[in-house]
Image (spheres, grey):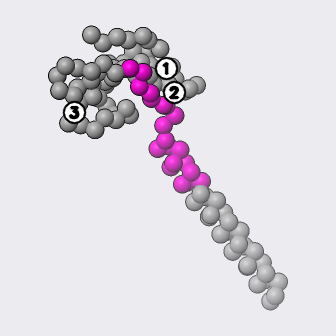
Amino acid sequence: MVGTTRISCCVLCWVFIVLALAGGGIVALANLMNSTWCAGRIVREFPSEYQDYAAVVGMISCGATGPDTSFVMIRRPNKKFDIAGDDYFFMIGGDNDIDVA
């Protein structure tokens, strides 16, 4: 009787360990899928003479997962500026020297 109780306890411990590892793996995978490997940075800003608008020239670098990309965005006075947002005027591959007139 003592031997079967010890085996039952060991099986229960192993089941708990496997479930904990599986749960941790699921959480880690979910965090990995929601993260981005790219980093954006502002290179220059060109202020407009109209209110607080500005053309923002920047660079997105994704390291080994993709090519560098230059972009131009419009920063609006009534909207929170988000470099990771979707307000791109245009994007062009590579590291480019962009001037806005």
Q: Which residue is mark 3?
A: 77
At mark 2, the secondary structure is: loop
The residue type indicated by label 3 comes to Pro
Q: Work out whether residue 82 or residue 38 is closer to the camera in this orientation and state it.
A: 82
Q: Residue at x 71, y 68 (%)?
A: 14
Figure label count: 3
Q: Which residue is mark 2?
A: 62
| Residue 57 picture location, percent across and down | 36, 20
Q: Is residue 38 above or below residue 97?
A: below
Q: Quadrant of residue 46?
A: top left
> Looking at the image, do the residues carrying marks 2 and 1 touch, with CB atoms under 8 Å apart?
yes
Quarter containing the N terminus: bottom right
Span colored in magenta: 25-44
User: How far is the residue under mark 2 from the one under mark 3?
Assistant: 29 Å
Compared across the picture, whether 5 is left or right of 80 comes to right
Q: Which residue is mark 1?
A: 68
Q: Residue at x 71, y 72 (%)?
A: 13
Q: Work out whether residue 89 or residue 47 is closer to the camera in this orientation and state it.
A: 47
The residue type indicated by label 2 comes to Cys
